[in-house]
Image (spheres, rainbow, N blue to C red):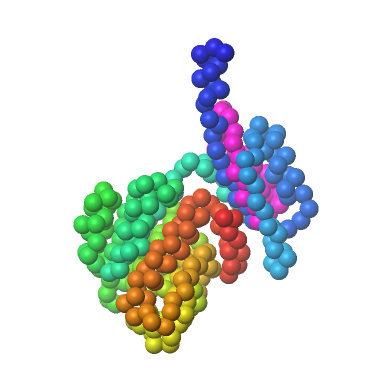
């Protein structure tokens, strides 16, 4: 083998991810796989799901392709297939890190967890900034060399604060916003503008114990399971499509402070998995539910 051919053989093929949803009908998988074959692509992994309740079909395909194939060429040539099946679809490079923006108030466990996971490469994301209505974690964020944006929120300046947030989203080309324990209710308009692009972590695996000190409320009720739910944000508070949930069993002898500590851990775990799956384009919206190709 010559040096040139050895170098060529060692060069890895580019990796791509295609996700789609559409009305379920015969021929979808055949059309997609035939398209990839005709364009010289190789399927690495494929997952699909047909929902009999909604009549929709969902698919995620991870495939590789040799140059001179590009993501732009693939998108342009796949458009005809997408149109013929009335697909909502996306096609992206698998190695392209998703640009995300974190939002936090005064509880920093999820923020710190995501910053650390991103730094060590456990999450395929680029954190382009952190927005907070307080300055408590400015030093922490700075230690990760991530821009910190302090946007105070009051009942009088809420619309201006959200306008500042959206400006950051536009300027930084943010693909996903994460409410890492951001304790402000977002307006209906903001929820609509960021629909499907904003994830929250809720301190329960059911939408219960709302308001102040939820773990103290749980302790007073004698709960035996502490949970957390990561979900997409909608105008309905804490009732958006669920992505991931985590629970931990607790005994009768735990204190409220111990419940809080357990809660911090399960919140971090559920949120990190939700962010990872979204960044890897494994989640497809299915009305008020999600399809997760984990």
- Is residue 259 one of those drawn in magenta? no
Q: What stretch is highlighted in magenta?
A: 58-87
Q: Look at 65% across and 51% down and name the residue there.
A: 47
Q: Position of residue 162 (x, y in %)?
A: 34, 66
Q: Which of 223 and 36 is in front in this view?
A: 223
The N terminus - image quarter: top right
Q: Nearer the viewer, residue 234 or 79?
A: 234
Q: Look at 73% across and 65% down and name the residue there.
A: 52
Q: Where is residue 274 in the image (x, y as percent from the top left)?
A: 48, 60
User: In the displayed image of the protein, which residue is found farthest to the top?
Assistant: 2
- Is residue 69 one of those drawn in magenta? yes
Q: Nearer the viewer, residue 65 or 171?
A: 65
Q: Nearer the viewer, residue 11 or 248?
A: 248
Q: Position of residue 293 (x, y in %)?
A: 59, 55
Q: Look at 27% across and 74% down and name the residue there.
A: 154
Q: Where is residue 60 in the image (x, y as percent from the top left)?
A: 62, 50
Relative to 274, is 85 on the left or the right? right
Relative to 86, is 268 on the left or the right? left
The C terminus - image quarter: bottom right
Q: Look at 51% across and 70% down and name the residue there.
A: 240
Q: In this view, does 214 lie above or below 124?
A: below
Quarter occupied by residue 263: bottom left
């Amino acid at each position: 083998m010559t040096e040139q051919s050895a170098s060529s053989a060692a060069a890895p093929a580019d990796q791509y991810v295609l996700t789609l949803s559409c009305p379920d009908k015969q021929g979808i998988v055949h059309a997609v796989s035939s398209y990839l074959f005709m364009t010289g692509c190789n399927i690495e992994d494929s997952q699909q799901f047909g929902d009999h309740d909604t009549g929709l079909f969902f698919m995620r395909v991870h495939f590789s392709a040799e140059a001179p194939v590009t993501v732009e060429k693939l998108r342009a040539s796949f458009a005809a297939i997408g149109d013929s099946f009335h697909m909502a679809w996306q096609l992206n490079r698998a190695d392209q890190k998703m640009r995300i923006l974190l939002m936090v108030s005064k509880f920093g466990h999820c923020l710190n967890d995501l910053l650390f996971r991103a730094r060590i490469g456990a999450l395929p994301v680029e954190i382009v900034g952190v927005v907070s209505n307080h300055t408590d974690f400015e030093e922490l964020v700075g230690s990760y060399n991530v821009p910190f944006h302090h946007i105070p929120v009051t009942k009088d300046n809420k619309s201006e604060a959200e306008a500042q947030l959206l400006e950051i989203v536009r300027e930084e080309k943010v693909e996903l916003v994460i409410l890492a324990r951001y304790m402000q209710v977002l307006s209906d308009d903001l929820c609509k503008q960021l629909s499907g692009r904003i994830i929250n972590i809720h301190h329960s695996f059911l939408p219960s114990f709302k308001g102040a000190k939820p773990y103290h409320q749980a302790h007073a009720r004698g709960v035996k399971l502490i949970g957390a739910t990561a979900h997409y944000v909608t105008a309905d508070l804490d009732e958006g499509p669920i992505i991931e949930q985590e629970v931990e069993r607790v005994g009768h002898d735990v204190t409220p402070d111990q419940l809080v500590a357990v809660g911090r851990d399960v919140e971090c775990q559920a949120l990190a998995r939700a962010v990872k799956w979204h960044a890897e384009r494994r989640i497809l919206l299915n009305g008020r539910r999600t399809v997760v190709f984990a």
